[in-house]
Amino acid sequence: MAHLFGPVPSRRLGRSLGVDLIPPKTCPYNCIYCEVGPTTCQTRQRFSYQTEAMISEMADYLKDPGPAPDFITMAGSGEPTLNLGLGRIIREIKAMTDIPVAVLTNGALLYLPEVRRELAAADVVLPSLDAAREETYRAINRPLPELSLESLLEGLMSFRREYRGRIWLEVMLLKGLNDTEDELTLLRRAIQKIAPDKIQINTAVRPVVEAAARPLDAGEMEAAAATLGGPVEVIASFSRADIVGISGRDDDFVEMLSRRPMTAPDLAQALGLPLVQVVARLKRLQDSGRISHNRYHDQEFYRSQETGAA
Ligand code: SF4
């Protein structure tokens, strides 16, 4: 499967079958906390990319999906709304299955009416808002110069007015950057205007692009949640450990690690395998050069060395 991945365990969506809508690493942002890596193609120009192939892969998958995933998720190694086929892909999937469709987006292109229209058919949209002060937005998300916090906020508010589905807003909190009382108060006011169905706060628990993206601890996350108020939840580690459809072959390990860095216990949970077996497999894959590891906040994370693995 070139464009589908998983089902993979998602902290926000349970067991999620991903559709990779965008080639790595294409995005209007270059966030300091990005888990995919530095942005190599920073753009806000939408483009055509593999629409027919994605629809046909999904049709094949749905012929024999096994236990249904909780969500089919439009995602990617970059920003999914850059794909001009987004609306068509969502509509075609909705016509094929009752499995709910979710879209992960940084929200930067929501100022475009056509992007908001294309998202209308999705069941859940999960945009991001990490700051409500221009300079903090620039420091964390490092957007293209022509993008502004104002256009992001206007896009989010317009989307809220027009969209009938659920909006789960993600806020990535980083120590010393957007976790002060001042920043959180501004965020709270901005979020109140957007009125999402959920506010999901996250922090940099995995290896990220810049060392400046430091995580909050559990107590600090709870305190930030209290300051933000509203329908807020702290996103924990994997809440659903089981996963189906992945057999635990070498290729499955490498493919999962090409999507995001994971620890050995993460993989053991995700693949439903004993930890000892996972550790042995990781060592072998590391010896053969297919994966690498690094230490991050006292945990060993593994990542694929095979770019574009699918
Ligand atoms: S918006 Fe997402 S993909 Fe783009 S740089 Fe930020 S974290 Fe990475």
Image (spheres, rainbow, N blue to C red):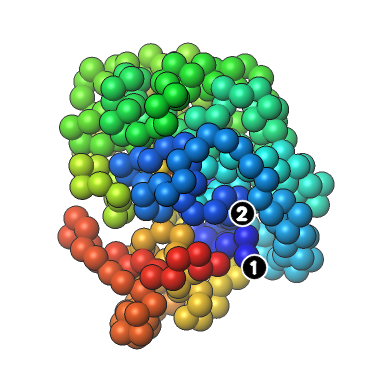
Dividing the picture into quarters, in which one does residue 191 lie? top left
Q: In which quarter of the image is the C terminus?
A: bottom right
Indicate the position of residue 235 as horizontal and vertical percent values.
39, 43
Residue ID at (60%, 50%): 21
Q: Residue 1 carries which label?
A: 1
The x and y percentages for residue 215 are: 23, 43
- Disc 1 on helix, strand or loop? loop
- Identify which residue is drawn at 68% across, 45% down: 48
| Nearer-N-terminus badge (1/2) | 1
Q: Badge 1: few (under 14), some or many (20 or more) residues near its Cα, within 10 Å? A: few
Instruction: Give the residue at mark 2.
Output: 19
Q: Which amino acid does label 1 sit on?
A: Met
Q: Is residue 87 above or below residue 148?
A: below
Element assignment for label 2: strand
Image quarter where ligand 1 lies:
top left
Relative to 100, say whether 270 is above or below: below
Residue at figure coordinates x 19%, y 55% from the top left? 297
Residue extending farthest to the right is 95
Instruction: Give 44 or 59, whichever is nearer the viewer.
Output: 44
Q: Residue 287 carries which label?
A: none
Where is 268 relative to 62, above or below? below
Q: Tell me the crowding category of disc 2: few under 14, some 14 to 19, or many 20 or more residues within 10 angstroms, Cα based.
A: many
Task: Please give the name of the residue rendered at 31% of the width and 84% of the height, measured from the top-left corner.
Answer: 287
* Residue 270 in sight in this render: no
Do the CB atoms of the residues marked 1 and 2 lie less than 8 Å apart? no
Query: Residue 65's x, y, as percent?
Result: 71, 65
Q: Marks 1 and 2, Cα distance to the nearest angstrom?
A: 10 Å
Q: Which of 123 and 89 is in front in this view?
A: 89
Task: Specify the quadrant that holds the N terminus.
Answer: bottom right
Instruction: Using the rendered view, name the quadrant where residue 33 is placed.
Output: top left
| Relative to 223, 306 lies left or right | right
The amino acid beneath tag 2 is: Val
